């Protein structure tokens, strides 16, 4: 097993990895930019090393990160998610330096990172894929021919894309012409490649992803599914495990396909196979994420498996400690991404100083956070403050527990998504447990919520009113 691991990430992601390292008796070494000097992951790590002055480029400096890992005596590197986590060049440089990369091979990252290569690999393995173009589109003329052959609506997608970026729905020729160049520019800016491909648009599908683990000895298992259908502009907001939409037969079938997809590319370590499922339970492969997912805590909640610890053990050459038959899931888990954003203002980021922070607790509650009272949320990074995960024996208990936890959660100084989530979780639509990717578009009234007033604020106002009335 490793003695020391460098974590090439920041914020709540780095803290999550630090915790598993410390539980396994492994030294956790963090890196940070000047802007992150007071970040919580710096305080939680066993050691923390300043990597550079630039708030963003510092975390993307491959050679600097590898050199720090070597100089600090680390024998492995964990990329987390975001930043360099799906960068094949980074994985290659880590391995070339004689260090262990805690993740899949550079070839797997590269092949699955290309949506066109991934489609080809899945087709060869007999995995159902969404009808689409044969490889990257040469130009708008080829795109028009392809769209007319498939029939509108279609989805334009960045071939090197991920995370919901570089995706545009087109309902006719005019929209396709308008979106083609725009999507190319988005793809180039986000991924360094303007290659696009096209898929048939599955209207109001369920976004279902299966968590897989694969060791170096040929064993591959899945840890069941997550329903990530509650999204805004292809960005996930609330995730649920397991999905109430899947039957046991469909769950078993999709799990087998997810395992087959990983085996088809000789995948090793943790990964996620993502599917779209229509109302008739037809499903298609969408993409494979070659990293730890933001929403992994809900899978941990229903299975009891520490996915980060398994990543580390797999990278160290250890076999999986369980078979598929030994794995099971229990209850329901829901994850809310608590972002410093204003939902009423088009989810605009709201960086600033946290003046008060109180997280919820109690049975079935987990908070993965990176903020504290007095912390200044910098404007340079993702706006996530924390992830709230709740678990219940059944769906109703999970919803009730979510309502209680969201009501307890108190973050002040910046606007957050908390009041929006309180409104969503208390709605009849959410209580139904049935979601598709058009959920928020179908119920725009969910954005019409009132600001939350904490109980202590009410008590304080009452006390002031009494004092004024008494002439004190």
Image (cartoon, helix red, strand yellow):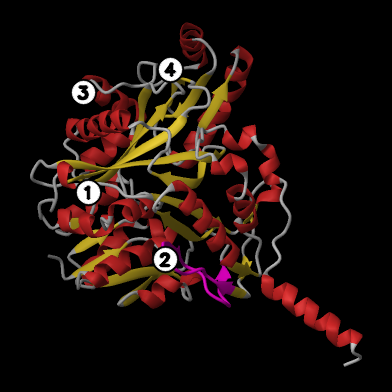
Report the disc number at residue 125. 3
Front one among 436 and 201: 436
Q: Quadrant of residue 182?
A: top right
Q: How many marks?
A: 4
Q: Are marks 3 and 4 in contact (CB under 8 Å)?
A: no
419 relative to 261, above or below: below
Q: Is residue 192 magenta?
A: no
Say the numbered circle drawn on residue 92.
1
Quadrant of the image occupied by residue 125: top left
In the image, which is nearer the foreground, mark 2 or mark 3?
A: 2
Q: Return the residue at label 2.
A: 363
Q: Residues within 10 Å of mark 4 (few under 14, many from 20)?
A: few
Q: Comparing marks 2 and 4, which lies closer to the viewer?
A: 2
Furthest-bottom residue in this view: 472
Quick one: label 1, few (<14), some, or many (20+) residues within 10 Å? some
Mark 4 element type: loop
Residue range highlighted in magenta: 357-377
């Amino acid at each position: 097993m490793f003695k020391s691991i460098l974590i090439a990430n920041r914020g709540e992601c780095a803290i999550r990895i630090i915790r598993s390292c410390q539980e396994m008796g492994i030294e956790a070494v963090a890196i940070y930019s000047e802007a992150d000097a007071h970040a919580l992951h710096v305080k939680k790590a066993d050691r923390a090393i300043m990597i550079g002055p630039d708030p963003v480029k510092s975390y993307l400096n491959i050679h600097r990160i590898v050199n720090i890992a070597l100089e600090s005596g680390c024998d492995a590197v964990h990329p987390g998610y975001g930043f360099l986590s799906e960068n094949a060049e980074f994985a290659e440089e880590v391995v070339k330096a004689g260090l262990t990369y805690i993740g899949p091979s550079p070839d797997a990252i590269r092949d699955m990172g290309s949506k066109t290569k991934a489609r080809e690999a899945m087709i060869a393995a007999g995995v159902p894929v969404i009808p689409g173009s044969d490889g990257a589109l040469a130009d708008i003329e080829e795109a028009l021919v392809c769209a007319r052959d498939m029939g509108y609506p279609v989805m334009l997608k960045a071939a090197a894309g991920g995370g919901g970026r570089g995706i545009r729905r087109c309902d006719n020729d005019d929209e396709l012409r308008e979106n083609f160049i725009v999507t190319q520019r988005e793809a180039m800016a986000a991924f360094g490649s303007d290659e696009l491909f096209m898929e048939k648009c599955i209207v109001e599908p369920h976004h279902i992803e299966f968590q897989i683990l694969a060791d170096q000895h040929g064993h591959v298992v899945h840890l069941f599914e997550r329903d990530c259908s509650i999204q805004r502009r292809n960005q996930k907001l609330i995730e649920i495990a397991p999905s109430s939409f899947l039957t046991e037969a469909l769950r078993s079938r999709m799990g087998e396909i997810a395992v087959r997809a990983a085996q088809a590319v000789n995948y090793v370590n943790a990964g996620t196979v993502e599917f779209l499922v229509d109302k008739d339970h037809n499903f298609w492969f969408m993409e494979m994420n070659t990293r730890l997912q933001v929403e992994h805590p809900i899978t941990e909640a229903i299975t009891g498996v520490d996915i980060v610890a398994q990543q580390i053990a797999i990278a160290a050459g250890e076999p999986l400690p369980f078979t598929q038959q030994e794995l099971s899931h229990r209850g329901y888990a829901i994850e809310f991404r608590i972002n410093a954003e204003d939902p009423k203002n088009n989810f605009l980021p709201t960086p600033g100083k946290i003046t008060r922070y109180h997280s919820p607790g109690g049975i079935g509650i987990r908070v993965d956070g990176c903020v504290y009272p007095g912390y200044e949320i910098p404007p340079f990074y993702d706006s996530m403050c924390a992830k709230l995960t709740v678990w219940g024996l059944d769906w109703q208990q999970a919803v009730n527990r979510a309502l209680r936890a969201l009501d307890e959660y108190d973050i002040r100084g910046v606007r957050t998504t908390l009041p929006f989530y309180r409104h969503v979780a208390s709605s009849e639509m959410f209580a139904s447990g049935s979601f598709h990717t058009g959920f928020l578009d179908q119920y725009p009234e969910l954005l019409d919520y009132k600001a939350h007033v904490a109980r202590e604020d009410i008590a304080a106002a009452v006390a002031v009113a009494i004092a004024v009335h008494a002439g004190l």
